[in-house]
Image (cartoon, rainbow, N blue to C red):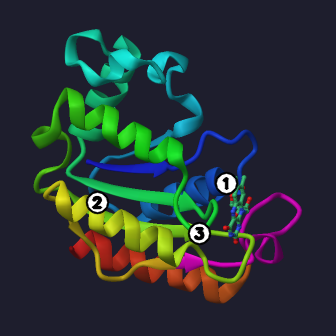
Amino acid sequence: MITILSGTNRPNSETKLVAQQYFSRIQTTASEPVKFFSLEDIPADLVQIEMYSGPGQSNDLALIQDEFIIAADKLVVISPEYNGSFPGILKLFLDACSVRELKATFKGKKVALVGVASGRAGNLRGMDHLTGIFHYLGAAVLPFQLPISQIKSLKNEQGEIEEEQTLAAIDRQIQDFLQF
Ligand SMILES: Cc1cc2nc3c(=O)[nH]c(=O)nc-3n(C[C@H](O)[C@H](O)[C@H](O)COP(=O)(O)O)c2cc1C
C-alpha cells in the first residue's frame, strides 16, 4: 500500500492541492492500493507533552499512524517550503509516530519526496533535510526528488497544475517510485 502524505496543516495549502493531483495520477498506474492523508487532519491534542510517552499519546494519532503510515510500505511525502525547510508540524508528526512505534513506522519503508514552494527553490533544502531524517529512521529515499517551484504560476483556475513539463516530471517520478 502507498500513502500520499500532504505535509502541512495550513488551511487551503497549495501542497494539499498538489498532493491530491499526485494522488489521482498515481492511482491510474499503481497496481496496489493508494491512500491519502493530509496533516490538516492531525488531531489537535498531538501538541502536548504526553506525545513523548507512548501510553499517553493521542488515540486519534494512533489510528492515523496505523492506517496511513504503518500499513503502507511506500510513502510519498509532499512538503511545502517554510523558511528554507519543511514545516515544523511535519517533524512533530514524524517525532510523535517514532515515539509510539519507530520500527514498524519507518524501517524498510520506501519514500518519495516532492517539494512545493512559491519561491524558486522548490523546497530542495527541505527535501535534503527529510532525506537525512528518513535515512536515520531506516527508510530508503527515492533518488529522484521533485522540486515544484513558483507553484502559483503553474496552476489553472481550478487550482490544478496544468503546466506540461511539471506534469511530465510528476509522472516520471511516479514511474520510478512504482519500480523502486
Ligand atoms: C511559514 C511560511 C514560511 C514560508 N517560507 C518560504 C520559503 O522559505 N521559501 C519559499 O519559497 N516559500 C515560502 N513560503 C511560501 C510557501 O512555499 C507557499 O505558501 C507555497 O504555496 C507552499 O506552501 P502551502 O502548501 O502552505 O501553500 C512560506 C510559507 C509559510 C506559511
Q: Disc 3 marks which residue?
A: 84
Q: CA distance from mark 3 to mark 2?
A: 16 Å
Camera-near label (3 vs 1) is 3
Q: Which mark is residue 133?
A: 2
Point out the stretch of residues depicted in magenta. Answer: 147-161
Determine if the magenta segment contains residue 60. no
- Considering the numbered disc 2 on the image, is that residue within a helix, a strand or a loop? helix
Quick check: can you spot residue 149? yes
Q: CA distance from mark 3 to mark 1?
A: 21 Å
The quarter of the image holding the C terminus is: bottom left
Check disc 1 and give the amino acid type.
Leu
**Coordinates of residue 146 in the picture (x, y in percent):** 48, 78
Camera-near label (1 vs 2) is 2
What secondary structure do most residues of the magenta stretch adopt?
Answer: loop
**Coordinates of residue 159 in the picture (x, y in percent):** 79, 59
Q: Which mark is residue 17?
A: 1
Q: Are marks 3 and 2 in contact (CB under 8 Å)?
A: no
Instruction: Give neighbour class at mark 1: few <14, some 14-19, many 20+ (Cα, 10 Å).
Output: some
Lower position in the chain sequence, tag 3 or tag 2: 3
Q: Is residue 102 above or below residue 1?
A: above
The residue depicted at 67 percent of the width and 69 percent of the height is: 117
Q: Is residue 102 above or below residue 148?
A: above
Task: Kindly tell me whether mark 3's CB lies below 8 Å from ligand 1.
Answer: yes
The front one of 13 and 162 is 13
